[in-house]
Amino acid sequence: MMNECEKGDLMMIKDYIVDTLEKLVNIPSPSGFTKQIMDYVRAEAESFGYSCEMSRKGGLVISVKGREEETIGLSAHVDTLGAMVRSIDSDGTLRFTMVGGYTMHSVEGSYCKIHTRDGRIYTGTILIKSSSVHSYDDARTMERTDRNMIVRIDEIVDSKGDVLALGINSGDYISFDAVFEYTKNGFIKSRHLDDKASVAVLLGLLKEMSEKKLEPNKSLKILISNYEEVGFGASWIPEDITEIIAVDMGVVGDDLNGSEYKVSICAKDSTGPYDYDMTGRLIDLAKENKIDYVVDIFPHYGSDVSAALRGGHNIRGALIGQGVHSSHGMERTHIKGLGNTLKLIKAYLDIL
């Protein structure tokens, strides 16, 4: 049986975190193209009474006063996978270069938006060049590489000149439509759950701390990074942070323990092991508070903590996050995973 506090947490997740997540995934924000979403996150955090400042490269730092002076950190990233116009073909289609690491199979057929430097937005579709079995013998066999992919623009264009007249040019960002859906049995299906699900969880945390006047055990800085998908999101962090947890996604897949219903605690990813004592403490907190969790290894993964360590920061670091199925594809998680991630963060901050 759930107690009243747990029921309140679940209601907050449904009423605020999921609603906020839907808003976040529908704000285009490929790595480096994040001003609009940062403005949104900053406005939310400031509405709860917390001070914010921006880093020079466009990241956000949210400060929360704690019961002790030592400063710890939490991080999540708002930047997503996307693309950028590489060139314009003579038939008026676009060639693109990838922003972030994904397979072309995972974006083929996706609706997208092209964002010009002067603020215009056009819609389009990502396609393989041989896009129809009725027209091309190699429609099924053509290799899905960036050299064979195009963006079909939803405008009357037949030439490169027509496209240039729209204001579209090389270097313009391309964002992928999220296609968000929240099912009646608690699944959340959408692109960009990596890592906007965690950003929504952290905003829910701030909302709850503000409304209940909760102070974490130590002073807290929440870092919202904007270049994580290209590897250097939190390579700079405030110098007073002594330890930091990246709140990102837990991978679900082959030879892994992850679950959409649980919070994953990562012991090691492609960059190496996370701090042994911090990881052990998170496991103990999950056990003590009956939080559904798994411990996992992510061999094809790096995080904001990885970037901070490579940036030379003298910190301890750990990684947690709700399980996300089909990461960097058509992603899915569950409200239980969000809830367990929130509970583990609150246990770490001693406010559960």
Image: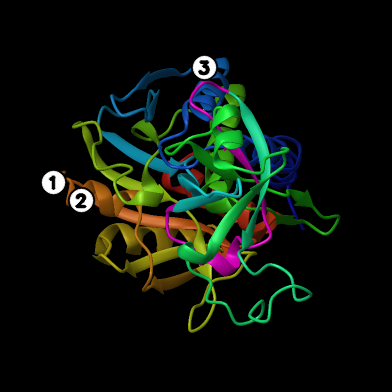
Marked residue nearer the N-terminal end (1 or 3): 3
User: Is residue 292 among the parts visible in the rendering?
Assistant: no
> Which percent across, then down, holds residue 340?
59, 55
Residue shown at the point (25%, 35%) measured from the top left: 237
Near-viewer residue (51 or 127): 127
The residue where tag 2 is placed is 309
Of discs 1 and 3, which sits in the foreground?
1
Identify the image quadrant of residue 213: top right
> Which percent across, then down, holds residue 57?
31, 29
Label 3 neighbour load within 10 Å: few <14, some 14-19, many 20+: few
Near-viewer residue (214 or 145): 145
> Which percent across, then down, holds residue 102?
48, 62
Q: Do callouts 1 and 3 mark residues in contact (Cβ within 8 Å)?
A: no
Side of 299 relative to 156 (left or right) = left
Identify the image quadrant of residue 115: top right
> Secondary structure under badge 1?
loop
Residue type marked 1: Gly
Residue shown at the point (60%, 42%) measured from the top left: 159
User: Is residue 284 among the parts visible in the rendering?
Assistant: yes
Q: Which mark is residue 312?
A: 1
Magenta segment: 98-119
Residue lying at the far right in this picture: please name it: 184
The residue where tag 3 is placed is 46
Cα separation between marks 1 and 3: 30 Å
**Is residue 310 a member of the stretch shown in magenta?**
no
**Looking at the picture, does residue 327 appear above or below residue 58?**
below
Side of 311 relative to 160 (left or right) = left
> Secondary structure under badge 2?
helix
Q: Do callouts 2 and 1 mark residues in contact (Cβ within 8 Å)?
A: yes
